[in-house]
Amino acid sequence: MEQVSNQRTAFEAEVIARFGILPNFFRSASAAPELIQKLWSFTKSAYLDNPIPALFKERLFVVLSRLCPVRYCIVRHIGFLLGNGRPAGDAHAPTHSIADVVNLLKRPTPWNRDMAAVYARLQALKAPMAEWPSPSTEAEDQLFACAAVLFSEPSRAETARPALLKALGARPFEYLAGLLAFIRTAHYWTMLHPEIETEEDMRALMREHVELARLLLEDPEADRCELGSRLFDELMALRELNEREELKKAKAALEEKDRQKDQFIAVLAHELRNPLAAIRSAADNLKLMDLADPRLERLRGGLDRQSAVMARMLDDLLDASRIPFGKISVESENIEFSGLVRDIVAHNEQLIRAAGIGLERDIPDLPCYVSGDRIRLGQIVDNLLSNALKFTPAPGRITVRLAARSGDVTLRVEDTGIGFDPSQSGGLFEPFIQEEQGVDRSRGGLGLGLAISRTLAQLHNGSLSGRSSGVGQGAVFTLTLPVASTPITAVQSKAEPRRTERRRVLLIEDNKDAGDALAELLGLMDCDVDVAYDGPSGLAIAIATPPDLILCDLGLPGGMDGYTVARQARADIRLGKTCLVAVSGYSQPKDHAAAKQAGFDRLVPKPITTEILDELLNNSSPKS
């Protein structure tokens, strides 16, 4: 500690020897005394020992300090000029009078004068000045004006810098640049150390000279064009830029995590379709078997219902993963919407009544047409009915109303269920948002149905909204769609002719449980079935015994995927009449397009229902 004290004493003595006083500037940074001593070294090299004349340096220090919002420097250096200390550390420099420094402080700044004329005079010099100009001369005034521009706006001093170089010459210009750098450092240092106080000798002087005090403390130039503000602006701009870059990186990282999450959900939903396909096929098998035991029938019914629920959740997960990337598309056609609604209500009626809930319909017999995707519109209606069923306890009531007016078709699904707080209506359509449930989660679900339905409604240029009078007051969800611009005449669809001959089916599926269960189901549907668990085996069976229908999984192992099977099958003339159907857990438009391009007649998503199988079998021609 004694050594540190001695070093500090020696340092202060050196400062006093140069300035005649100890400025508070050099009392700062007490927590890092070695730093202020380094700053002292810069003070000496760029300011005190700089060969520029002392009065020129000191007067320029005052002129440039007018631009600093912290007034310590200008007050202290006016003091040096007045003899309260030594100008630029020169004990022999003449002192100024109050009138001298007042005149110096009243000089016009570069922003209040014709700088073009100043630049022209300096550029007109035939040779650099032989010596530094004396105080209060025109030459000094011109150099000070150019130096102020270079000091305060170095990036925009393309005219001031050449003028100074022409007037001074290269070496003196570098001495001036060093002095400007130190003055800038001194200003910045005082801004970072607001605890530096004006010394008592200068406070007393300003109390005696009111005009001087006003010029020092109320200089408008400090507000209009101050260097400190520029420095802080530069630093804040750099800080904001850095924060924006960090935010950009953080946003990119979050988006990547979100993309990975959505990709994971899509893959998870796809992978779960394989075991679900086996479960669903087993349930369909039990349905077609002659089961006299009512207990087995109850078990089969439960298996069928729960596998259907799981299939719905997987479909919702896949759709939810596609929404952020805009990968949900609709294939528009003119649809008789009232018939579609009646069919979906009829399909859900047994489930609704089995839950002890009443069902009322108000669906006009007159047809109304909308332009849209039949499957996606059916998904919206089904989601609204499922939502009403889920949140309506027995004995409740669900009412479905359909009306067409003013160019719109409006479907309202009303229930007498648990309702919701009206203030929460905005969050109903956010993914994964659900009404809070107990630990039993008796209502189940993922909180995706309404979010997906609204997106689908918007893709049809429609809207979906929900309202409730409050908790326990039921809810109403309203789907609005534009009427089709060119309604079509209803055409009675002809029933598909029932097949009378057995079909030969080849099933290529690497998941043995799923393949065997589906093969068993096809057998119960009067088909002759061959099963292969990889591509090469399946292709060999197909060529040896051409089937009527090939159901081929796309994700086959062993180097031959479903696309390769399709391409090679289509290249073989013996399979020219075979119906080739891809089976996959993926069912995006790009997947259907890729299947078509490879040679498949169509793609069907897993799990395959008996209705889809029946359609495929009816559309495949038996080989003669």
Image (tube, rainbow, N blue to C red):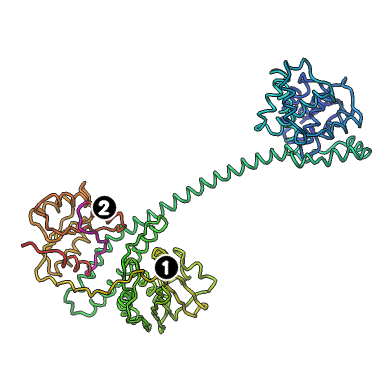
Q: Where is residue 300 shown, x and y percent of the image?
A: 25, 74
Residue indicated by mark 2: 594
Is residue 545 shown above or below 337? above
Residue shown at 10% from the left, 71% from the top: 500
Label 2: how many Cα within 10 Å (few below 14, some 14–19, many 20+): some
Q: Residue type at mark 2?
A: Ala
Asked whether disc 1 touches disc 2, contact meaning CB atoms under 8 Å apart, the reply is no
Marks 1 and 2, how far apart in space? 30 Å
Answer with mark 1 or mark 2, whichever residue precedes in sequence.
1
Q: Where is residue 598 shown, x and y percent of the image?
A: 22, 51
Left or right: residue 424 compared with residue 454:
right
**In the image, farthest residue toward the left:** 624
Q: Residue type at mark 1?
A: Gly
Residue shown at 77% from the left, 18% from the top: 51
Secondary structure of the residue carrying numbered label 1: loop
Q: Residue 606 is drawn in which quadrant?
A: bottom left
Q: Quadrant of the N terminus?
A: top right
Residue stretch in magenta? 598-610
**Which callout, 1 or 2, points to the residue nearer the camera?**
1
Asked whether 603 or 439 is in front, the reply is 603
Q: Is residue 531 magenta?
A: no
Left or right: residue 24 compared with residue 587:
right
- Per the rendering, the mark at residue 462 is 1
Residue shown at 87% from the left, 21% from the top: 93
Q: Where is residue 539 shown, x and y percent of the image?
A: 14, 52
